[in-house]
Image (spheres, rainbow, N blue to C red):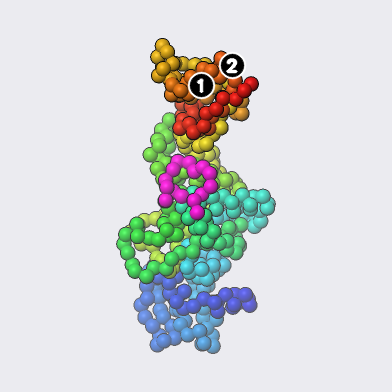
Amino acid sequence: MTDLEKEVIQSITPLDFQAYLKERGWQLYGKLANKASLWQSNSKKILLPLQRDLVDYEHRVYDLLNDLQAFEKRSLQSILTDLTHAQADILRIYAFKDDVKNNLPLEAISTLINSSINLFSATARSITNPQPVYQGKAPKEINSFVEKLRMGHTEKGSFVLVLENPITPQLIESDDISNEPFDRQVSIKLCQNIASLLNNMANISIGSFDDNMMRGISSNFCDALAEITDVCGDKGAFIDLTWAPVRPIKKEWNISHKFSIVPAMSGTLREMSRILKEKTPETNVEIEGYVIKLIANTASSSQGGRIHIFDTNSHRLIAIDLDPKQYTQALDAHKNDNKLRFIGNLDKSTKPKSLINIVTMEQMNG
C-alpha cells in the first residue's frame, strides 16, 4: 500500500462505503459488534470495518478494496474515484481501451474535453427546450449547470477521461423518475440518448431514416459523440457512467449506462446530424444580392409575390416570399440594378433554399 493510497483510504468514511455497496446491490446481513459490518452479493461476502481508530483499519480497508477490485473487475483507481466522489455521477470515456497507449496528443485531448462538455450541454438543453439543432449561446441556466462539471484524475488502463457531475443527495425516496433533480436528469438523459442512437443505428437501413428516431436528440449531441469517437482510437469510444451513491438509481428504470461506439458509427452520427441541420431553419441569416427572378402572385403585383435572389455572400440561390409592399420594393431594386439586403431565417428543406420570418429588408445602391 502506497502513502497516497493510505491518504485516500483515510479520506473515505464508512458511510461512503455503505452508500457505494448499497448502490451496487450488496446486502447488509450482519454486524460484528460496532467494529464491522458484513455484506453479501450473491455468493460473495465482504467485511466493512466501521471504526477508523482500529489499529489495522487501513489494512482491512485495503483488503476490502482488493476484494471489490476482483469482484467488479475494475481498477483500484476507478473504485477509489467513485468512493471519494460519492456525491457525483462519474462519466468515464476510454480512449485506446486495453491498449498499451496511455497518452494522447494535446489537440486530441482538447477535442475530447470540449466535445464532452458539448455532450453535457446539448443534453441539458434537450431537457429544458428540445430542439433538433441548437444555435447561438446556451441560456444562463444551462451555462450554470456546465460550470459545475468537474474533471477528475485520469486513470490507468489506456487513456481515461473522468468527468464529474455533482448530484443532489436523495433525502426522500421516490419511484417516479420525473421527480429526479435537474443534475440527475441530465445524466439519465445522456445515457438514454446514447442508447437510443445505438439502437437506431443497429436497425436503420437505406431510406428508412425517420424523424421520430431522433426525438429529443439534437444535431449538437450527434456531432459531439462523433468527435469523441474519432479521437478514441481504432476501437472507438467506450463510455461508462457511474451513478452517485448518494442518489441511487432504481433498477426498474432500466437505464443502460455502459456503451461501446465503434469508429464506423461516427459517419452515421454525422449523417444524422446533417439531416437534422437540413431540416432546421438557420436563424438570423444575412442575405445580400441581386434579384434574378420575379414571380408575382397575380397578374399584377398587388398580392405580392416570390423573388429569387443570388446571395453574393454564400454564392447560392435563395427564394423569398414577399408581401405587396416588399414585392414593389424588389421590383424597384431589380429595375435600378440595386442589391437587396435581408435578415431572416433560412429554411434549407426547400429547393431552392428559402428565407422566412424576415426581420430586415433594405435596398442598397449599386
Q: Is residue 27 above or below residue 206?
A: below
Check if residue 130 falls in the magenta segment.
yes
Q: Amino acid at mark 1?
A: Gln
Q: Amino acid at mark 2?
A: Asn
Q: Please tell me which residue lies in front, 279 or 245.
A: 279
Instruction: Identify the residue at horizontal 37%, vertical 72% (top origin).
Output: 27
Residue 323 seen in the figure: yes
Q: Which mark is residue 133?
A: none
Q: Is residue 44 above or below residue 296?
A: below
Q: Residue 108: image x %, image y %?
A: 64, 50
Q: Which residues are magenta?
A: 125-140
Provide the residue designation for mark 1.
329
Provide the residue designation for mark 2.
336
Instruction: Identify the residue at horizontal 50%, vertical 39% (top origin).
Output: 273
Q: Residue 228: image x %, image y %?
A: 56, 48
- Assign a secondary structure to mark 1: helix
**Crowding near pointer 2: few (<14 within 10 Å), some, many (20+)?**
few
Q: Is residue 356 above or below residue 2?
A: above
Task: Give the tally of numbered discs.
Answer: 2
Extreme-left residue of the structure: 175
- Assign a secondary structure to mark 2: loop
